[in-house]
């Protein structure tokens, strides 16, 4: 079936995403650890759905243990723990949080008793046990929807403690997607209880769609947020380490203006005043940190044509404009890698702060210039 195949893809995607979040140093944090656990439990929820569709529980009864665990409880608790850790709320360290796992334990114990009844007829051994267990089973019908609604509302109240607008926005989107799938689940259960409509396939497709959106939102959010946080930290360090400069015109600007009519534009050497000005712009003004920098912008700063700028760089350095600027960016990256103050920052974040526009561009340029990858360079010098 197409649905089963798509569900299997979503399960595999969730497992891979969870492993990436747990193992990648880019995402290493307590908050992301709980997000990974939540994604794993979501994958197990889908796996349980697949097993029901293919009726594997009838063929392999032992796997019924997967069905005995109400993964919904764990998933929502892990999402709560992710959010309170992400916004760094003090409640994340409270022992009281452990009470959130009680509904999960309650459900698991009751299901174990139900299985024992199937195996050894536990309910028939004692009439009292039979009545009590049936009452506890009935109670579960109210506990699950009440828990879902309560923890969703409770979790939402902590989003406001986020101090970053971008972070707050994507957490709200993630929370909305999760709320959509579980509130729809409650409505589906109620419809099946009180009406004769069969909406099981609609619910399965809804679960699949929202799961894929949760995967995408989770990865996109933590990836972008981590890079934004690294950018903020790296930029603060660079500002601290870079001496403040004024925007006054340098003597080099004056020299260029004075000699504009007499400068030999065909003199393509390092003594060329325009090349000196270019070097000054790169070394002192660090114009290479502008990711949108191109020939036209640079030529305009120098007061020359883009074509003349290309000839100048090529004749003196035997490089084109892009490689010339990238060399400065790579040197900036190497300086940051060698500086212990940047040890806690991801290499991709460092590369992006040096104004490389993507991971591929950064790694390719770095390896072309040094012969090794940024990772190998960091390991060799640490």
Image (cartoon, grey):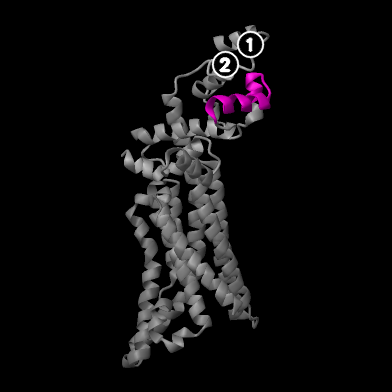
Q: In this rendering, does residue 88 appear at all?
A: yes
Whether 194 is drawn above or below 42: the answer is: below
Whether the residues at callouts 2 and 1 have beta carbons within 8 Å, the answer is yes
Q: How many marks?
A: 2
**Which x, y percent locates residue 102?**
37, 66
Q: At x 46% / y 79%, what residue is drawn?
A: 138
Residue 377 horizontal side relative to residue 316, left or right: left
As drawn, the label of residue 263 is 1
Q: Pick the residue in front: 130 or 328.
A: 328
Q: Which quadrant of the rendered structure holds the C terminus?
A: top left
In terms of sequence position, does the residue under pointer 2 or pointer 1 come before the other?
1
Q: Which quadrant of the rendered structure holds the N terminus?
A: bottom right
The magenta segment is 299-318
Q: At x 45% / y 42%, what residue is drawn?
A: 367
As drawn, the label of residue 272 is 2
As drawn, the label of residue 249 is none
Q: Pick the residue in front: 64 or 91.
A: 64
Judge the density around disc 1: few (<14), some (14-19), many (≥20) Cα neighbours within 10 Å: some
């Amino acid at each position: 079936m197409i649905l089963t195949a798509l569900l299997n893809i979503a399960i595999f995607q969730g497992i891979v995403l969870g492993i990436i979040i747990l193992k990648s140093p880019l995402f290493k944090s307590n908050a992301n650890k709980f997000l990974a656990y939540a994604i794993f439990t979501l994958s197990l929820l889908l796996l349980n759905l697949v097993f029901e569709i293919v009726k594997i529980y009838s063929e392999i009864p032992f796997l019924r243990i997967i069905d005995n665990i109400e993964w919904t409880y764990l998933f929502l608790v892990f999402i709560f723990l992710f959010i309170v850790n992400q916004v760094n709320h003090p409640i994340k360290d409270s022992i009281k949080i452990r009470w959130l796992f009680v509904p999960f334990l309650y459900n698991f114990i009751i299901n174990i008793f139900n299985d024992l009844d199937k195996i050894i007829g536990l309910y028939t051994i004692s009439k009292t046990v039979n009545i009590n267990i049936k009452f506890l089973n009935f109670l579960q019908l109210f506990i699950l929807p009440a828990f879902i609604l309560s923890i969703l509302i409770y979790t939402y109240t902590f989003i406001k403690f986020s101090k970053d607008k971008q972070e707050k926005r994507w957490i709200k989107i993630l929370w909305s997607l999760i709320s959509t799938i579980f509130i729809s689940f409650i409505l589906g259960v109620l419809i099946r209880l009180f009406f004769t409509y069969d909406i099981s396939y609609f619910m399965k497709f809804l679960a699949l769609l929202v799961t894929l959106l949760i995967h995408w939102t989770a990865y996109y959010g933590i990836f972008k947020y981590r890079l934004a946080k690294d950018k903020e930290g790296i930029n603060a360090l660079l500002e601290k380490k870079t001496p403040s400069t004024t925007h006054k015109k340098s003597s080099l600007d004056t020299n260029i203006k004075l000699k504009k009519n007499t400068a030999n534009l065909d003199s393509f050497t390092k003594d060329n005043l325009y090349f000196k000005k270019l070097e000054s712009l790169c070394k002192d003004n660090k114009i290479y940190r502008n990711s949108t920098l191109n020939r036209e912008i640079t030529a305009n700063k120098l007061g020359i044509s883009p074509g003349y700028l290309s000839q100048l760089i090529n004749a003196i350095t035997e490089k084109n404009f892009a490689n010339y600027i990238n060399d400065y960016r790579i040197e900036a990256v190497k300086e940051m890698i060698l500086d212990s103050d940047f040890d806690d920052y991801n290499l991709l974040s460092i590369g992006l702060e040096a104004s490389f526009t993507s991971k591929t561009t950064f790694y390719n340029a770095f390896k072309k210039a040094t012969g090794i990858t940024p990772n190998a360079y960091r390991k060799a010098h640490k």
